Image (cartoon, coloured by chain):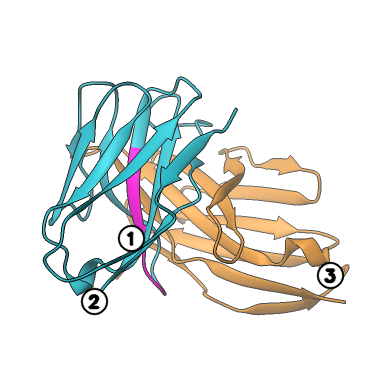
Chain colours: A cyan, B orange
Amino acid sequence: NAGVTQTPKFQVLKTGQSMTLQCAQDMNHNSMYWYRQDPGMGLRLIYYSASEGTTDKGEVPNGYNVSRLNKREFSLRLESAAPSQTSVYFCASSEREVGAGRRQYFGPGTRLTVT
Amino acid sequence: RKEVEQDPGPFNVPEGATVAFNCTYSNSASQSFFWYRQDCRKEPKLLMSVYSSGNEDGRFTAQLNRASQYISLLIRDSKLSDSATYLCVVTRNTGGFKTIFGAGTRLFVKA
């Protein structure tokens, strides 16, 4: 089992460029999440998908879009990258929405720099 | 004020020491609580869930105090391999599902 995989691992974009971050999980989990992590701050939830076919905004959704392509895959798209989106992006999954004892499994992260 | 607050540290302790971290949360509707561990430039990994009755996993003990709205993590007999950042995580489902991470507490265990 690979768990949660993310591509790419690193990316440099110019302001205004677009890109899609890919995430896949092989644990048959229902829920998937996208977070960003900035220095000195906790991970912040961008979007999540409680189940296939549904997506909802998290704490910091502006400037991002998501697609739950199927049960395994959940992608994050930056339509017009801005320097403020320079961050480390983590994808995560859980069997169901995180509750008592329901852990999230994280991918290795994508380090994105926008110049 | 952040919804989940942690002392950023760093905590510098010798091997074998006992160290405790606290985390406070401000929303009384918070439902589930976790401690995650994050090594430098790596992804967070679950250390333990935190239950109202308190729970222990080897050298690690977690406690929840709902009345005072804080959770704690106690590490006994610290090992060099315990050096990491410890993240406090709180979830709730009021006004939509929310997972809130603390900024983390850095721990360095020295030989």
Left or right: where B17 falls relative to A91: right
Q: Which label number is shown at residue A15?
A: none
Residue B72 x %, y % = 60, 57
Please state which amino acid type lies under the numbered disc 1. Glu
The quadrant in which the N terminus of chain B is found is bottom left
Gap in Å between the C-alphas at discs 3 and 1? 30 Å
**From what the image shows, is residue B44 above or below residue B10?**
above
Between disc 3 and disc 2, the foreground one is 2
Overall secondary structure of the magenta stretch?
strand
Residue at image coords 33%, 60%? B3
Q: Is residue A34 magenta?
A: yes
Q: Which residue is mark 1?
A: B3
Gap in Å between the C-alphas at discs 2 and 1? 31 Å
Q: Which label number is shown at residue B17?
A: 3
Q: Is residue A47 magenta?
A: no
**From what the image shows, is residue A9 above or below residue B52?**
below
Label 3's element? Answer: loop
Residue A51 x %, y % = 29, 23
Left or right: where B35 falls relative to A17: right
Please state which amino acid type lies under the numbered disc 3. Ala
Label 2's element? Answer: loop
Res B28 visible: no
For the residues bearing labels 2 and 1, Cβ distance under 8 angstroms: no
**Subunit bearing disc 3:** B
Q: Which residue is mark 2?
A: A115
Residue A109 x %, y % = 45, 53
